[in-house]
Amino acid sequence: MEIPYTVKPRPDTGLYNAKLGIWLFLASEVMLFGGLFSAYILLRVGADLWPHGMLSIPIGTFNTFVLIASSVTVVMSWASLKLGKLASFKLYMTLTIACAFGFLGVKSYEYYVKFTHYDVWFKDDATAQKYFTAAYGEKGEADVRKHFVERFHLHNTKATYDPHEIQLAGHIQGNPLFASHKTLAKAKTEKIMFEPDPKFGSHDHPKAIEIPVSDVKRLSAYVPAHSTYFAIYFTITALHGLHVLGGALVLGYFLVTADKWWKKAPEQFANRIEVGGLFWHFVDLVWIFLFPIIYLL
Amino acid sequence: MSLKAFHIVFIIASVLLSFGVGSLELSRYQETRVAMDLWFGVGGCAAGVGLIAYGVYFLKKLKNISYL
């Protein structure tokens, strides 16, 4: 049995069936991402503290250009089919898939950096002050407070924070993934060697300091459990990343079966590429909104 | 809406983003005087101009393909 309206437009809709189908699907995707964007905005405006500058703008910008480039190549691959150039189609589609995996590779690196970066809160004010001094010298507490003010944009607030409410950021020696005060206690780890981040505005790393786990109130990597900020950040970007992966796999399937389809049904094949390209553009458009909201604002 | 029309929408959004990033970074540069902000500001605006040029090229190249 032949599937109807894979090439010619259906008279009542004016579109071939796959195009109508993909737009209905994209409408549901708008609702999915729209809900998450709304959640992000509501969480942000309702938060007492919301961090800034936690993500690398150069890396995010690079990934934005990779996705814009992939949109150009995917539309060129479709245009190549319309012009009857199968070899050009293959070249542009290969570039599109390469961009997709390039994006995912960079995103994975960003995730790895977050999963090995830690914040530590101490059990009381005196303990916190002791480690701030050990990390940054006599004016250690002032340096940590400066970091805190910059991270949360607290320049114009009169709210005060005790030392034990202020986190010390850095890395645990050996760069373990996903460690927390709970996992350290479970593993009966008595102490960690902590490498604090450089002072605000400096690139010089202070010496590592030894911290007994008994002095730690909370220790968390930059994982979803760290804070509302990272929870919504990982939720939205991971969902977006899954869409990129899914799109790349579908486009990859179109690429490896191109010869067969081109011989059997060239017009239907061009329509399939158009539908794949529409999904790909939607995924890229989500990132165009995501990048400024998460990285820049 | 065809891929051609959606691509034009996407390029318009990308142009707006590029100029937005460019102006944001240039205004940051006025406060911070950090060279990186200046490069990002100029780069963002240049990318916006480049995308407009690409959009015009794209419209000319695909003028025979429908918007539906």
Image (cartoon, grey):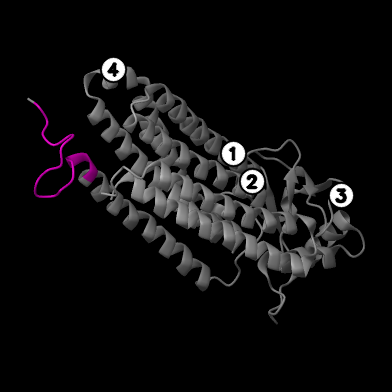
Q: Earlier in the sequence, mark 3 or mark 4?
A: 3
Q: Which residue is label 2 attached to? A: A59
Disc 2 and disc 1: Cα gap in Å?
A: 8 Å
What is the three-letter code of the residue carrying label 2? Ile
Q: Chain of mark 2?
A: A
What is the three-letter code of the residue carrying label 1? Val
Extreme residue toward the right, this view: A138
**Is A154 located above or below residue A211 in the figure?**
below
Q: Earlier in the sequence, mark 1 or mark 4?
A: 1
Q: Which mark is residue A204?
A: 3
Badge 3 and badge 1 both on one subunit? yes
Q: Earlier in the sequence, mark 2 or mark 4?
A: 2
**How far across and down, in percent of the image, does residue A210 sit?**
82, 46
**How far across and down, in percent of the image, does residue A248 sit?**
42, 33
Query: Residue at position x 57%, y 38% from top?
Result: A108
Near mark 4 (Cα within 10 A), the count class, few <14, some 14-19 or many ≥20, is: few
Disc 3 and disc 1: Cα gap in Å?
A: 25 Å
- Nearer to the camera, A212 or A52: A52
What is the three-letter code of the residue carrying label 3? Asp
Q: Earlier in the sequence, mark 2 or mark 1?
A: 2
Q: Magenta stretch: give its range.
A: A2-19
